[in-house]
Image (tube, grey):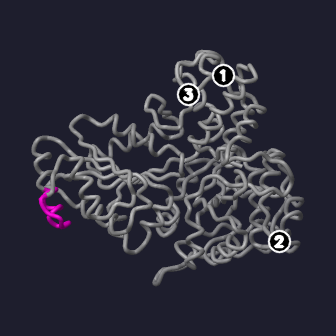
């Protein structure tokens, strides 16, 4: 029990990291995702997939789904990702009060079908919830596919929901998994919180725990927590809990930057800026690019047999930015000569027309972004300069399409990705956003700039199917992109 409860007038700890459904925050698309999950499950919509980074709220969604299900739904929760085909059948049988008489998978399947038909006849349905699905062996995932085929003439005998980290998308993209992937009718993603969403989240958790006073966390402390936590709710909880403890020990009734900085110093996953040249970790990207590059090409980096490569527009002979060739109309990202001179080769500067704009990137954010160095890689230096210009010049309500987020931020590897990408897309529309978090890096790759969400969503729909399947493009407004630095 947190020792600061009485000090803040709390009835219980507001920031425990174990999921508690009384503290479910329905902002940041969580409530909409839960409603969509319930609809998909209750309307027999095939296999459903929920992906997200560690600590982004997948388990809480799972708990809420179980709590909101009607009583006629039998749930089977599988938390061990290393089960074999036989073991997963046994685990399902135990939850359904079924004792197998044989040892073979075929016999187990036959007895399971009989039990499912019995439950269906009595008006009950079965839902299997699989956690950590990204770590399941391929043969076990194949068994899941076979289970999804069990049905009567008109109804599925069971429903399946897969919860996993973004690596599950790479697993499902393997040729051997195409039959399973084709059966996934709905895919949801738990994304990191923006600063504004984190402010509402912190206020909601405090009041759910019994707090009745004015806001405890100042805007500056919330921004610092969100950045250090990469917007991930579990990390936000850890930092908020430590910050409240720091305020209590100092006999303060509010949390400001000093208490948050003390919390960050006491955390393993977050570090404070101390000197120039420090490396920073980046928030949020479906961990695709590292494996793609290691394998020598996939999706964006490799054009399949018989497919027509996407045309790339050549730069115009004037000083204007290159014309867009893939998505369509976009708002061009303003750049500045000073930024280009600082980070790009001299022969690159001529390709861009400087446009005077009021910078929207804070000095601290710009300094953190500068901590990720291109290490002499020309294309990466160019894209970092253009990215910084886009972040400085686009208003909060403009959007870019997030393609993916990668854990491996090695500059040479990113350069190889850009070399492959320029054969298929116009690199002037590709942005590489480094986001600070401790001593490591992650990279968010986005595409294009758009004046509003509708334009971004329309552009995503016009992407070739190959890109939509590989990257799951998501619109991100520039306020969110800047806040994640």
* Callout count: 3
Q: Nearer the viewer, residue 235 or 287?
A: 235
Q: Which residue is mark 1?
A: 215
Position of residue 398 relative to residue 300, above or below, is: above
Residue 28 at x, y = what percent? 54, 39
Residue, x 20% and y 47% (percent of image)? Answer: 96
For residue 355, side relative to residue 127 (left or right): right
From this viewpoint, which residue is outermost toward the bottom? 305
Residue shown at 66% from the left, 38% from the top = 195
Question: Marks 3/2: CA distance?
Answer: 51 Å
Q: Which residue appears at 31% of the width and 53% of the height?
A: 160
Label 2 sits on residue: 348
Q: Is residue 200 magenta?
A: no
Q: Nearer the viewer, mark 1 or mark 2?
A: 1
- Which mark lies nearer to you, 3 or 2? 3
Vertical placement of residue 272 versus 209, above or below: below
Q: Is residue 478 left or right of residue 44?
A: right
Q: Earlier in the sequence, mark 1 or mark 2?
A: 1
Q: Name the residue beneath numbered marker 3.
A: 14
């Amino acid at each position: 029990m947190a020792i600061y409860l009485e000090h803040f007038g709390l009835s219980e700890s507001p920031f425990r990291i174990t999921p508690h459904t009384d503290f479910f925050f329905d902002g940041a698309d969580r409530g909409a995702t839960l409603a969509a999950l319930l609809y998909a499950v209750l309307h027999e919509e095939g296999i459903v997939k929920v992906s997200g980074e560690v600590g982004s709220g997948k388990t809480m969604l799972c708990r809420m789904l179980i709590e909101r299900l009607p009583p006629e739904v039998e749930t089977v929760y599988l938390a061990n990702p290393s089960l074999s085909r036989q073991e997963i059948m046994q685990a399902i049988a135990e939850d359904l009060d079924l004792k197998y008489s044989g040892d073979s998978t075929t016999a187990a399947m036959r007895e399971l079908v009989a039990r499912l038909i019995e439950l269906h006849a009595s008006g009950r349905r079965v839902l299997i919830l699989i956690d950590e699905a990204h770590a399941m062996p391929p043969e076990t995932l194949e068994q899941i596919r076979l289970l999804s085929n069990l049905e009567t003439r008109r109804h599925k005998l069971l429903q399946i929901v897969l919860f996993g980290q973004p690596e599950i998308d790479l697993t499902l993209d393997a040729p051997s998994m195409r039959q399973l992937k084709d059966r996934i009718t709905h895919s949801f993603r738990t994304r990191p919180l923006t600063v504004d969403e984190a402010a509402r989240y912190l206020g909601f958790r405090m009041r759910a725990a019994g707090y009745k006073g004015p806001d405890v966390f100042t805007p500056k402390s919330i921004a610092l927590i969100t950045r250090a936590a990469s917007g991930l709710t579990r990390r936000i909880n850890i930092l908020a809990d430590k910050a409240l403890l720091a305020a209590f020990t100092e006999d303060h009734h509010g949390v400001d930057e000093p208490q948050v900085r003390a919390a960050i110093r006491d955390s393993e996953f977050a570090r404070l800026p101390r000197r120039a040249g420090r490396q920073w970790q980046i928030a949020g990207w479906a961990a695709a690019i590292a494996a793609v590059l290691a394998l020598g090409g996939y999706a964006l980096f490799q054009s399949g047999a018989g497919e027509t490569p996407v045309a790339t527009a050549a730069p115009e002979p004037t000083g204007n930015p290159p014309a867009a060739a893939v998505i369509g109309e976009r708002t061009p990202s303003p750049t500045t000569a000073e930024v280009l001179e600082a980070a790009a080769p001299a022969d690159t500067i001529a390709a861009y027309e400087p446009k005077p704009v009021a910078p929207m990137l804070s000095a601290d954010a710009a300094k953190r972004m500068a901590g990720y160095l291109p290490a002499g890689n020309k294309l990466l230096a160019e894209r970092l300069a253009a990215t910084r210009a886009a972040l400085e010049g686009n208003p909060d309500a403009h959007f870019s399409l997030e393609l993916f987020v990668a854990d491996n931020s090695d500059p040479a590897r990113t350069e190889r990705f850009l070399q492959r990408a320029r054969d298929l897309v116009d690199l002037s529309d590709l942005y590489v956003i480094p986001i600070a978090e401790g001593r490591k890096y992650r990279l968010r790759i986005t595409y294009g700039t758009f004046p509003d969400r509708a334009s971004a969503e329309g552009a995503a729909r016009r992407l070739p199917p190959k890109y939509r399947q590989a990257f799951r493009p998501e619109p991100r407004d520039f306020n969110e992109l800047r806040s994640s630095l």
